[in-house]
Amino acid sequence: NKLSLLVCGGAGYIGSHMTRMIAEAGHDVTVFDNLSTGHAEALKWGKFVQGDLRNPEDLAKLFAENSFDAVFHFSGLIVVSESVEKPFEYYDNNVTGTLNLLQAMRKHGVNKFVFSSTAAVYGEPVMEMITEDHPLKPLNPYGRTKLQVEEILQDYAVAYGLNSVCFRYFNAAGAHPDSTIGEAHSPETHLIPNILLSCIDEGRRLKIFGSDYPTPDGTCVRDYIHILDLCDAHLKAIGFMDSNKGAHSFNLGNGKGFSILDVIKSSSEVIGREIQFDYEPARAGDSPRLVADSSKAAKTLNWTPQYADLRDIIETAYRWHKNPAY
Ligand code: UDP
C-alpha cells in the first residue's frame, strides 16, 4: 500500500538516495531540509519543504500541512573533529533538533521513526565483530549525540508508544549506479571519496591518518557498506515496525574489514592506476577497527546487501566523482 513518508535531511548524501528509493517504490515522499550541508540539485524526487529542525515553527507548519505514516531522520552533523570543537552545535542540531521533530510527531500521532545512528556509539571496540550488545561508550560528542537520541527513543517507546528503528551505520560509501546523485561533502572527510578525488584532481594528495594502529598493516580497519544497501534496510524497517513495537537498534555493515591500504589497493584496481599518498598523524578519536556483525538486521529485516564486494562500492563512487552533478 502507498505510504506518505517524510525524509528529514533528504538533500544530503544518504537522505537523497533514500528519497529516491522511496519514490521509486511508489510511495509519496516529502523532504525537509535546511540545505546547510545538503544540495538542492539532489532534490529530484518528491516534494521539498525548506526548514530547520531547530525551529519548532517550521515543523509545526510541515506537520499541519502534510500527513505522514513514518519519518526517516538523516539531518545530522557528522564530523567528529568538529563535534569536539563545537559541542553546542552538535547537541543543538542532533539532540534538540530531534526532540523537536519527535514532539511534532507526537502531536500529530505519527508513531514510526527511523533514525541514522552510528558505529561511533560503541567507542573503543572490545569485540572482533561488533554486535548490538557491545558496550556503548562513544569517544566524542558526535557519538554521544547519536547515543542520546537512541536512549530518548527507548523512553519514548515506553511512555508514548513511539516505535523506532535506529541503524548504526558502519562506513557508508558508493553512489547510485546511474551517478545522478552521489556523495558531496564539503570539506570531504571520508576515505573513499578522498582516495578517488586524489586521482581525479591532480592538486589533491591523499593523506593516510595513522600508520601504527594495532592492525595487520598499521592502518585503520573499517566495514564499508553501499549506500543503496543501507537505504534498502531503512525501507524494510517501515514494514518491520507494523508488527514490532518498541525501540530497536541494528548494525548495518558488510561484516568484512578493510584497512586503508586495502581500500587504496582496491581503488587502484578499479581506476587502473597507482595511487600516491602520504602518512599523517592519526586523527583524534579514530578506532583502530570497526567491523559489524549485521546478522540481526539480516535476519530480522530479511535484508541482504547487494553490493557486498568492495570494488563494486568503489566503482559506483568513482562513476559519480568523475563527473559529479553537484
Ligand atoms: N582516512 C584517511 N584519509 C582520509 C580520510 C579518512 O586516512 O582522507 C581514514 C580515517 O582516519 C579512518 C578511515 O580512513 O581511519 C575511515 O575514515 P572515514 O572518515 O571515511 O570514516 P569513519 O570511520 O571515521 O567514520
Image: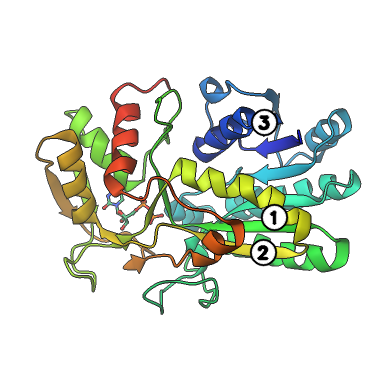
- Furthest residue in direction left, as rendered: 274
Q: Residue 240 shows which numbered tag?
A: 1
Q: Is residue 149 left or right of residue 125?
A: right
Task: Compute the Cα span from label 2 to label 1.
Answer: 10 Å
Name the image quarter holding residue 136. bottom right
- Residue 37 x %, y %: 52, 34
At x 39%, y 30%, the residue is: 177
- Residue 240 x %, y %: 69, 55
Residue position for label 2: 248
At x 90%, y 46%, the residue is: 107
Residue position for label 3: 31
| Label 1 secondary element | helix
Q: Nearer the viewer, residue 114 or 147?
A: 114
Q: Quadrant of the N terminus?
A: top right
Q: Mark 2 or 1, which is nearer the eye?
A: 1
At x 72%, y 43%, the residue is: 71
- Residue 195 x %, y %: 24, 41
